[in-house]
Amino acid sequence: MRDCYEGPQAAEARSWESAVQWLRAQPSMEQVVRESYLGEDVVAEAARYGASEEFRATCRLLGADRLPASARILDLGAGNGIAAAAFARLGHEVVALDPDESATVGLRAVRAMSASLRLGCLRCCCGFAQRLPF
């Protein structure tokens, strides 16, 4: 599968994927990988993030308790999709927008996780916030 964008943006996405793969391979960076939810098992990372104080604080900051149960949420720069999955698990309709299609930290990772968790309310869209494709 090719990237949804060509040129500098596609190269930047590949660089990010390479950087995360390098980071994972560094024993001294294990804590950074863990705290950034960048482990190889995206399903486990999503579950860990969804149960975290960090996610609860994000919900408080966004006033998520005042949202209707099936609110529409746009996750700009979704990365590996952990936040998108957490909101989808709460029953919200979520669009994960990211220019990176990679299976490491991009939309292929989000799609695989979404399928594994059967998150029918999580949709992926390749693009940039500056040029929303919808």
Image (cartoon, rainbow, N blue to C red):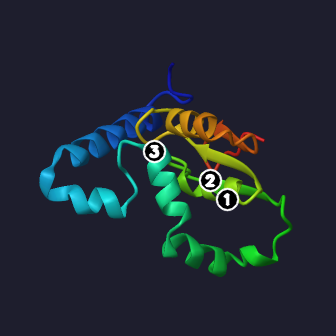
Which secondary structure, mark 2? helix
Task: List x then y, in percent, for residue 11.
Answer: 38, 33
Numbered disc in front, either 2 or 3 = 3
Tell me: residue 114, above or below residue 65: above
Which secondary structure, mark 1? helix
**Residue at the disc numbered 3:** 42
When asked about the image quadrant of residue 117, the answer is top right
**Residue at the disc numbered 2:** 84
Q: CA distance from mark 1 to mark 2?
A: 5 Å
Tell me: residue 74, above or below residue 67: above
Residue 112 located left or right of residue 73: left
Task: List x then y, in percent, for residue 53.
Answer: 50, 76
Residue type marked 2 = Ala
Tell me: residue 30, above or below residue 99: below
Badge 3: few (under 14), some or many (20 or more) residues near its Cα, within 10 Å? many
Mark number displayed over residue 3: none
Mark found first going from the N terminus, 1 or 3: 3
Residue type marked 1 = Phe
Badge 1: few (under 14), some or many (20 or more) residues near its Cα, within 10 Å? many
Residue type marked 3 = Val
What residue is shown at x 50% (from left), y 70% (from top)? 52
Contact between labelled residues 2 and 1, with CB atoms less than 8 Å apart: yes
Tell me: residue 70, above or below residue 44: below
**Residue at the disc numbered 1:** 87
Number of marks: 3
Badge 2: few (under 14), some or many (20 or more) residues near its Cα, within 10 Å? many
Q: Nearer the viewer, residue 118 or 60?
A: 118
Residue 31 located left or right of residue 55: left
What residue is shown at x 62% (from left), y 39% (from top)? 114
When asked about the image quadrant of residue 40, the answer is top left
Mark found first going from the N terminus, 2 or 3: 3
What residue is shown at x 72% (from left), y 51% (from top)? 94
